[in-house]
Amino acid sequence: KAELSAMYGSGRHCFEDGTCYDLEGFEQIIDNSRNPEDLLMAWSGWREIGKPMKEKYLRMVEIGEMGSKDLGFEGLSDLWFSKYDMSSDEFLSDVDRVWEEVKPLYDALHCHVRGELNEFYGDEVVKNDGMIPAHILGNMWAQSWSNIYDLVYEPSSVDASINLTQIIQEENLSEVDMVRVAEDFFVSLGFERLADTFWERSLFVKPRDRDVTCHASAWNLDSEEDLRIKMCIQKNEEDFVTIHHELGHIFYYQAYNHLPSIYESGANDGFHEAVGDLLSLSITPAYLKELGYINEEQYLDAISDPISLLMKQALEGIVVIPWTLILDKWRSQVFSGDVEADQLNNLWWELRESYQGVKAPIARDYDAFDPGAKYHIPGNTPYTRYYLARIMQYQFHESLCNDIGFDGPLHECTIYNNPEAGEKLKSMLALGSSVPWQDAFEELTGVRELSGESIINYYSPLKEWLDEKNEGRQCGW
Ligand code: X8Z
Ligand code: ZN
């Protein structure tokens, strides 16, 4: 396990001409370039690091299966899905039920994005039917498409689309300043400021003298005050959102660290991932105006074009959803031994094709192990938690916005500086895992079930717009 994680963290690939890239180097290209050859080079280059992981990975699975059976489970999947206060069958059928609710929105977005990419790149790179090749979507795993926002939407005016990356640069925010802004958000909700040790002991910037695993993480070291994050912050919108995500973990730790140790965890692992994501929905034009990052005129421009804002959100928040299903669907088949070693990569691509409508841009080598190129596979971190978070965050947002009497479209609601919303959130977090997650969920939302309704409500103006745009297009893949 340690070796696999280290292989990912220190992963780099060198080409015949002697140039070498690590993940951040490759991402620089994938996130920003519009040159299909460069994109393909970066996409396939990073996947070279997966190949040598396959054997170790299978051995890890073998040991994990044995261990979980020794503990009385049917296997590793059974163990992983045993933590949701309901039977794993019931849980997994809830997961699929909600996906069916969200899928029409994803399909409409996929159709529109594919159409626009076809116009930009032409038939040679992406055809107007079928799947989208994974290298042109602005993210190493095609799990967020927000970097190609400008290719898929033209705002009604320059200021109608808020560019957080630009704001961060104009405001001259340092990496630590970005974390302070996120901390301030939590403090505005009534959370306690972070201890000095957080600021002294966290890692915010990629060190120049050694390899570190840059994938962002949040640590609860002594179940008391020693809380830290570790990430290689880049001064852009994506990392600003990730900082909120990580601080969500930190403030959850802070809220439940007073409990007996057995209760010191999230109501379920999805809750833990959802806290910071919930706050990200409150980074609205009104919030940015309040901080002084945009003026009245920019604010009015921004809210006059709701599609601009919703499109930006959807390219991250909707796009990620099918992706969050794939990892554990792949793993559950691998863990159970249903798939032969030489079919592991094919199964991976079958799932990516069917759920995301995304395909490999180039034939995969016989020894490719593409799942290894995603942190959570060598890291052996369950991934359905992110699916839960991406659904629940909208349920939390909608109910908090209702509670505070917000009257308007959900994408304009911010809970910033609202002690009532803060108190409600805090008291749920303070429960840790002392009650079944459904009880904690009910405390905040009034309901006990996962539902796609809030996310559908949130994006309903966008869905209408997409349906109109897609008229006459041949959707689906
Ligand atoms: O892994 C993470 C966090 C760490 S808990 C940065 N996320 C998933 C990913 O990067 O794949 C957050 C979004 C999904
Ligand atoms: Zn997380």
Image (tube, grey):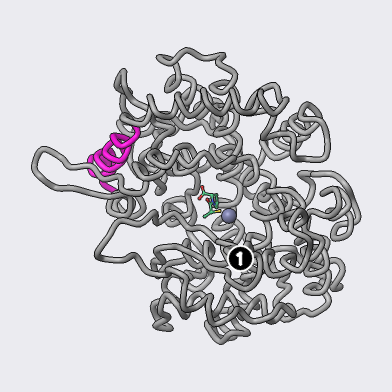
The vertical placement of 379 against 164, above or below, is above
- Residue at point 61% right, 58% down? 310
Furthest residue in direction front, as rendered: 70
Residue indicated by mark 1: 222
Q: Is residue 246 magenta?
A: no
Ligand 2 is found in the corner quadrant, namely bottom right
- On the rendered image, what quadrant is the N terminus found in? top left
Whether residue 31 is visible: yes
Q: Nearer the viewer, residue 398 or 204?
A: 204
Q: Is residue 37 magenta?
A: yes
Q: Nearer the viewer, residue 349 or 162?
A: 349
Does dot 1 land on a helix, a strand or a loop?
loop
Image position, residue 300 (x, y; %): 61, 78
In which quadrant of the rendered view does residue 278 lie?
A: bottom right
The vertical placement of 440 against 121, above or below, is below
In which quadrant of the rendered view does residue 72 lie?
A: top right
